[in-house]
Image (tube, rainbow, N blue to C red):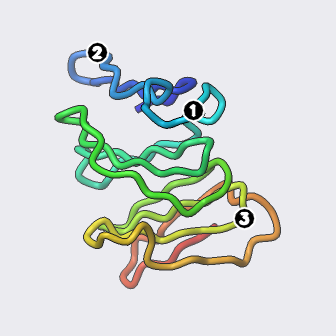
Amino acid sequence: AVGLGACVYLWSACTSKVTKLCDLSESNVPNSNQEAAAVTSVSWTQKGTHLAVGVNNGEVQFWDTVKCKKIRMMGGHSARIGALSWSGPTLASGSRDRLIYLRDMRVSQPFTARLASHKQEVCGLKWSYDEPSYLAS
């Protein structure tokens, strides 16, 4: 998956086919503009059929890439999402607002935990492979 401007494209290594997953500038959000709709990060789930998309306006979107359909939008951040990382059903999102949110896709709340220890933008997140999982930022 590649984020270019307000669009996300999917490339198939098997067929070399490119598919446009979405164009966030076409959203029906009032006062939306190209800069606010810019894709700032992408991250695949482990199974590879769903994609998290971080947006410049602080929103995280969850997409079904087989159906090319947005499943859900999650707020919380007040600035661009610079880092996304999965551990099972849990997505960690890090932002320019210096916060990390943990988001469990099995629950309806936009996030299950808020981590506020960074002094500057969160620009990288990675879960350990061990159990229990640890998150590096």
- Place of residue 13 in the rendered image (x, y in percent of width and height, measured from the top left): 29, 24
24 relative to 62 in the view: left or right? right
- Between the residue at mark 3 and the residue at mark 2, the CA separation in whole angstroms equals 37 Å
Which amino acid lies under the numbered mark 3 shown in the image of this protein? Arg
Q: Which of marks 1 and 2 is nearer the N terminus?
A: 2
Image: 22 above or below 126: above
Q: How far apart are marks 3 and 1 (CA)?
A: 23 Å
Q: What residue type is labelled 2?
A: Ser
Mark 1–mark 2 distance (CA, rounded to whole Å): 32 Å
Looking at the image, which residue is at 27% across and 48% down?
Answer: 71
> Callout 3: few (<14), some (14-19), or many (20+) C-alpha neighbours within 10 Å?
some
What is the x, y in percent for residue 39? 54, 35
Quadrant in the rendering for residue 129: bottom left
The residue lying at 27 percent from left, 24 percent from top is: 12
Question: Badge 2 is on which residue?
Answer: 16
Residue lying at 30% horizontally and 41% vertically, measured from the top left:
70
Badge 2: residue crowd in 10 Å (few <14, some 14–19, many ≥20): few
Quadrant where the image shows the N terminus: top left
In what quadrant of the picture does the C terminus appear?
bottom right
